Image: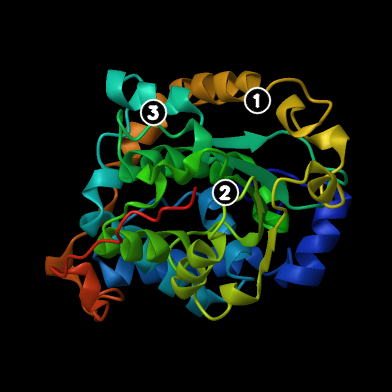
Amino acid sequence: MADLNIRPISDILRKKAKAELNENENLIAGELEAIRTWMKQSQHIRGRTDDQFLVGFLRACKHSIQRVKEKMDIYYSIRSVLPEVMANRDPLDPFVRQVIKMGVSVPLPKTVNSDDPKIMLIRGNAFNGDVCDFPDILKVFTMIGDIQFRDDDQMLICGETAIVDLGNSSSGHFFNFNLSFLKKAAILNQQGSPLRQKGFHFINTPRGFDIVINVFKGLMTEKNRDKTIISHGSSLESLHKYFPKSILPAEYGGDLGPVQQFVDDWEQKLIDNREYLIQDQSLGVDESKRRTTNPIAEEKDLFGTVGSFRKLELD
């Protein structure tokens, strides 16, 4: 890959990419050329074409060119039906910055092994539904994800595991979703996201949580339903069987110090990448130039069907 503008990766990541993602360094140049040719011929996608970005999609799709085409088309098409998430991604916008400061989505910096999935901490108790709505939280989540996708080779190759803390989220705010929006979000985060989700661990779960789990699974693709989904109740001891103290913040019995430092780190990182995030808003699809069927057009609930979940009383 000497002639390509792609970051070198460690031997352990190289072995994992070869074994699990079908990566063959001798074929990457040809694969990238095939993707660029397809983008040029399809005409409707306005997307990034640099080596590092495209190799991220290859890794996300285990080097299947066909899967790259499908995922990239959804990745850019979904933006037109989710403006509440994909527009106004300026981290210095006062409202957006306020949502960032909540720290609902917080990437954790460490893993036990350098080829373990990275860890995303999602804190339901940090979500203030009087200040913002769920789409605003998802906006910041995707902003963080876009920077991780660009910069974090371990995450691209090894995937991501989520620790979801539902402490005090029985207020109902966290579960009062518009059903149409929730289905769009599910497509964005599954079929359209190049980040590979490896599992979900729930902590501080309220009574009646099985209702939420069933809704959660119902929105998953068949493939993702097989992912690890574990509820630890309120037991940190149970959580520590999967995530030792050495890689957890203090609030979860860990050695890393308070979560707030990672919230602050990511606030600054998003600000440092402001130009990149704003530039990303100009990317998407031009449906007037599309020669194929819109990959999300068959999702009828995305267009015009409105419904909502009632508040789930879980206290």
Residue appearing at x 39%, y 40% in the figure? 137
Left or right: where 75 falls relative to 79:
right
Residue 94 marker:
none
- The kind of residue on which mark 2 rests is Gln
Residue 34 horizontal/vertical position (percent) = 49, 71
Of labels 2 and 1, the one closer to you: 1
The residue at which mark 1 appears reads as 259
Q: Which residue is tagged 3?
A: 99
Contact between marks 2 and 1 (CB within 8 A): the answer is: no
Q: Is residue 245 above or below residue 134?
A: above
Structural crowding at the residue carrying mark 3, measured as other residues with C-alpha within 10 Å and reported as few (<14), some (14–19) or many (≥20):
many
Q: Which residue is mark 2?
A: 52
Q: Of circles 3 and 2, which is in front? A: 3
Q: Earlier in the sequence, mark 3 or mark 2?
A: 2
Residue 153 as seen in the image, left or right of residue 92: right
Q: CA distance from mark 2 to mark 1?
A: 30 Å
Q: In the rendered structure, which disc, 2 or 1, sits on the residue that comes first in sequence?
A: 2
> In which image quadrant can residue 107 be found?
top right
The answer for how far apart the CA atoms under marks 1 and 3 are is 16 Å
Residue 91 seen in render: no
Q: Amino acid at mark 3?
A: Val
